[in-house]
Image (cartoon, helix red, strand yellow):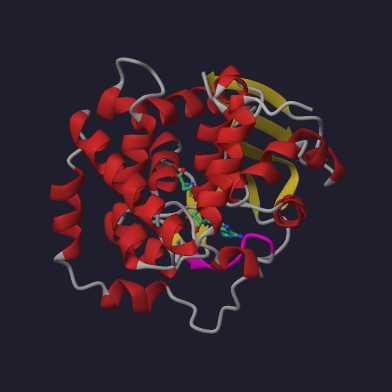
Amino acid sequence: MAMTTDSLAVRLVNHFLSVKPLANLARQQARKMMIQRAESVGVQWTKQVEILRQRAWKIELALVENAHLDYPEYYLKPFHAYTQGNLCWDAALEVEVAAHAAHARIWPQAGAQGDAKLRASYHAALEAQLPAVPHCILDIGCSVGMSTMALQSAFPSAAVTGLDLSPYFLAVAAYRAKDLPIRWLHRPAESTDLPPESFDLVNACLLFHELPKAASRQILQESYRLLQPGGYLAIMDMNPHSDIYKKMPAYILTLLKSTEPYLDEYFSLDLEDAMVDAGFTKPSMTCNTPRHRILIARRN
Ligand SMILES: C[S@@+](CC[C@H](N)C(=O)[O-])C[C@H]1O[C@@H](n2cnc3c(N)ncnc32)[C@H](O)[C@@H]1O
């Protein structure tokens, strides 16, 4: 079969990324471009990260870290532009500005407000579809608390817990939310050790695209266990069926995958079927942006 220019470009990019020093170079380059792009849309990356860097984080880290935690092997891979993935201060101090930069282009005019708009569109769908205000919310993959604090603000009367595998992210979350009554847990979402049926909403924003299939399935089962009968699981993440990914040149998608090690697994997992397999009702599907979707399902 003749090789197309696209498949040749993909092979070249894959070959390039298989050489470790070149892959590291590509990551550094990607990071540089991300910072430039952020600053150009009004996200003050350098200034905001510098302010965070000046803090001594020891106390926050000690308060949230579970030093005996065994990390799943898949979590120890490089993620985004960081060789140590989510387990380092660089990632923790930059994740908020990186999210603002990444979401600045969802809508052409959104700029630095893109992230806030993304979360508002999610909460609008959530509020419209939940039959009642949730009392007890678990935010899995909460990172530095952006999704958690947004949930607390959407549902002020709810008791909210944020859970993540990165103690660095959780330390930043605890600092950002110091005036809010949010509980932070350093645990894997697949085995939380929390009591069964203790939540009426489990939330996962932008978590599943970072997971291999087996972990996704385990997390769905754990979410089912944690929810009261009639409780809801709500997931907002990249939409694999969106035209944006379908039309993306293959070599750009390959570059994207070099920073998101499980994107292939996420794109080939039928998440709606996996939710049903875990015992949930068939989820509703809402496209809240040109490249994100929301899946909401009830625990029977
Ligand atoms: C892209 S971030 C999503 C952040 C946040 N929910 C938001 O909306 O901004 C994905 C998060 O999931 C966390 N994560 C990945 N695998 C996890 C697991 N098995 N258990 C708990 N957290 C996990 C990562 O540490 C990271 O903070």
Q: Residue at x 55, y 84 (%)?
A: 68
Q: Look at the image and tell me in which quarter the N terminus lies.
A: top right
Q: How many marks?
A: 0
Please indicate whether residue 31 sits to the left or right of residue 216 in the image. Answer: left
Residue 196: x, y in percent? Answer: 73, 61
As rendered, which of 5 and 128 lies closer to the eye?
A: 5
Read off the magenta span: 185-190
Q: Residue at x 19, y 73 (%)?
A: 56
Q: Answer yes or no: is residue 138 visible.
A: no
Farthest bottom residue in view: 68
Residue 90 sits inside the magenta stretch: no
Residue 206: x, y in percent? Answer: 53, 42
Quadrant of the rendered image containing residue 130: top right
Farthest front residue in view: 2
Majority secondary structure of magenta residues: loop
Please indicate whether residue 190 sits to the left or right of residue 281 in the image. Answer: left
As rendered, which of 28 and 203 lies closer to the eye?
A: 28
Q: Residue at x 33, y 53 (%)?
A: 28
Residue 182: x, y in percent? Answer: 41, 56
Q: Residue at x 44, y 51 (%)?
A: 80
As rendered, which of 74 and 194 lies closer to the eye?
A: 74
Please indicate whether residue 258 sits to the left or right of residue 226 in the image. Answer: left
Residue 186 sits inside the magenta stretch: yes
Please indicate whether residue 95 sits to the left or right of residue 143 in the image. Answer: left
Residue 61: x, y in percent? Answer: 35, 74
As rendered, which of 54 and 7 lies closer to the eye?
A: 7
Q: Look at the image and tell me in which quarter the C terminus lies.
A: top right
